Image: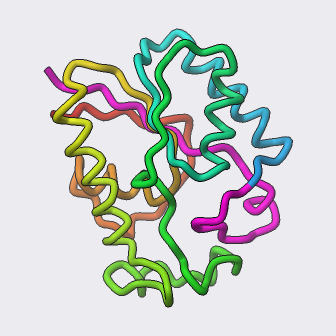
Amino acid sequence: MPIELVFETHSTTEDNENDIATGWRPGVLSETGREQARELGRRRSNDGIQAIFTSDLARAVETVHIAFPDHTLPVFMDWRLRECDYGDMTGIAPDALERDAHIHFPYPSGESWRQAADRVAWFLRDVESKWQGWRLLVVGHTATWRGLEHRINDTPLNTPFEWRAGWEYRVG
């Protein structure tokens, strides 16, 4: 049986609002982000979600805790769902990250978008082997989305990201 996988990004952070690329830093949700997280909880509260997987970075974990404060669902934190590691370029303006130059070549002291997508593919292989027939929520980052899109839909890794209220995939 296929897995129904719902992907949502973490909510808006203070760094997002200040035009800072957070990378593997924890990040803190802004007031706008906390409201977005509450909206995520309302949007997905009766959606048949059976388990939640989240990046272990604080901004994703905070999004899940706010969205589902009284949940009884199992929640699993997984480092493979993290944002791309921008290394020495962490903290600069996102527009200065030169993403296309780092599809296959790592950021200085960081990783490439390919390496980040490979982490997500590894996560998906594990999920496919253990969660057949489940409806799962995954909360992550742009790199998580790119990895899912690339592995599931063969979307190029330099596809521009545009936020929306969730993506749904069938895998396995």
Image height of 79 relative to 160, above or below = above
Q: Quadrant of residue 2?
A: top left
Residue span colored magenta: 1-27
Image location (x, y in percent) of residue 102: 41, 83
Image quarter in which the C terminus is found:
top left
In the picture, measured across the screen, residue 150 lies left or right of residue 159, that is left
In the picture, measured across the screen, residue 69 lies left or right of residue 102, that is right
In the picture, measured across the screen, residue 145 lies left or right of residue 28, that is left
Q: Quadrant of residue 124?
A: top left
Image height of 87 relative to 59, above or below = below
The foreground one among 136 and 170 is: 136
Q: Residue at x 45, y 53 (%)?
A: 79
Q: Residue at x 24, y 26 (%)?
A: 131
The foreground one among 70 and 5 is: 70
Image height of 61 relative to 147, above or below = above
Q: Residue at x 46, y 64 (%)?
A: 160
In the picture, measured across the screen, residue 2 lies left or right of residue 24, that is left
Q: Residue furthest right?
A: 31
Image quarter in which the N terminus is found:
top left
Check the image and tell me how it is coloured: rainbow
Q: Residue at x 78, y 33 (%)?
A: 35
Q: Residue furthest bottom?
A: 108
Magenta span has 26?
Answer: yes
Magenta span has 6?
Answer: yes
Report the label total: 0
Image location (x, y in percent) of residue 109: 50, 86
Image location (x, y in percent) of residue 7: 44, 38
Image location (x, y in percent) of residue 167: 43, 37
